Image (cartoon, rainbow, N blue to C red):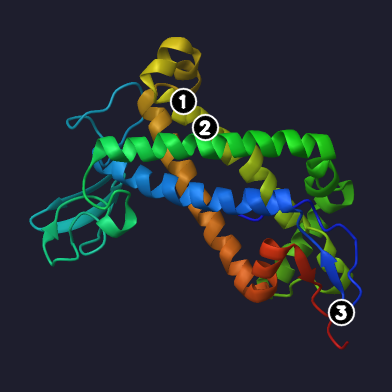
Amino acid sequence: MSSTDMFHTEEMQRGGTIYRHRLSTRIWHWTNFVALVILLMSGLMIFNAHPRLYWGEYGANPDPAWLQIGNADGEGYLRIGDFRVETTGLLGVWEDENGATRNRAFPGWATIPSNYNLALARRWHITFAWVFAIGILAYAVWSYWNRHIERDLLPMKEQLKPTHIWQDVKKHARLDLPKGEEARHYNVLQKLAYLSVLGGLIPLMVLTGLTMSPAMNASWPWLLDIFGGRQSARSIHFICAMLLVAFILLHLAMVVLAGPLNEIRSMITGRYRLPEETGK
């Protein structure tokens, strides 16, 4: 996920190249990337231990699950409410690298570790949860100190007008991406997306993760009241994780459309070449 100290106007001498990302931002970006990949893959292994989600205080095999990944009669399936789709070969039933059939929710290539090991998956997950949480805390303190969020991510009043938002939606639908000077700043859709992740998804993931910890339940029992029990917290945690994956996939798609070499270079070196305006 790209999070920038937005587009400082310090120009290089040639070609409309600007210094876009500070070193601290680049380090945070790549640390987050590694941490999120490991958190996701280890989380899927944890989910494999009980591939069902519930609402409320309790959840066990006889209880009705709102989501389930399972297998029956040799076929894998995903069920959400009353909707059910066959997923043999991907979810529920799949073959490992040796050609052996496995009856687990997520395949080994998508999990850490690749072989079933709940204890080891929890160690990976908790370790990198700390890496992720410390990075987020450092980012929040740094952003408050240098006014990054106030200066670069908060939409201006005119940007929040429905007509302005609709124009941005139409431009994205036409793949009419910002060029020239316009590319120096986030558009309103980018701002709203980043703020939703930073102010919504990530805090929810952290708090619901804490709610699933028995030790935290003893220390902060009010978390259970906020989220309606550990099983509800587990469901919200899973939903937030999937939404974060969707955000990352959308982000990667936009990087490809905007010019992957330029975008990735800017997140490695900090230097970004402004896209030329049409007709120039």
Residue 112 versus residue 21 in the image, above or below: above
Q: Are marks 2 and 1 in contact (CB under 8 Å)?
A: yes
Badge 3 or badge 1: first in the primary sequence:
3
Q: Which residue is mark 2?
A: 206
Mark identifier at residue 15: 3
**Label pair 2/3, CB-CB below 8 angstroms:** no
What amino acid type should be assigned to the residue bearing mark 3? Gly
Q: Quadrant of residue 217?
A: top left
Q: What's the residue at 87%, 75% (across, down)?
A: 16
Q: Indicate whether 39 appears above or below 226.
A: below
Picture coordinates of residue 36, whole percent (x, y): 49, 48
Residue 83's x, y, as percent? 30, 51
- For disc 1, the neighbor class at 10 Å (few under 14, some 14 to 19, many from 20) is some
Picture quadrant where residue 234 is located: top left
Instruction: State the separation of the CA atoms marked 2 and 1.
Output: 6 Å
Secondary structure, mark 2, is helix
Residue appearing at x 74%, y 70% in the figure: 171
The local secondary structure at tag 1 comes to helix
Mark 1: amino acid: Leu
Q: Position of residue 249 (x, y in %)?
A: 52, 61
What residue is disc 1 on? 210
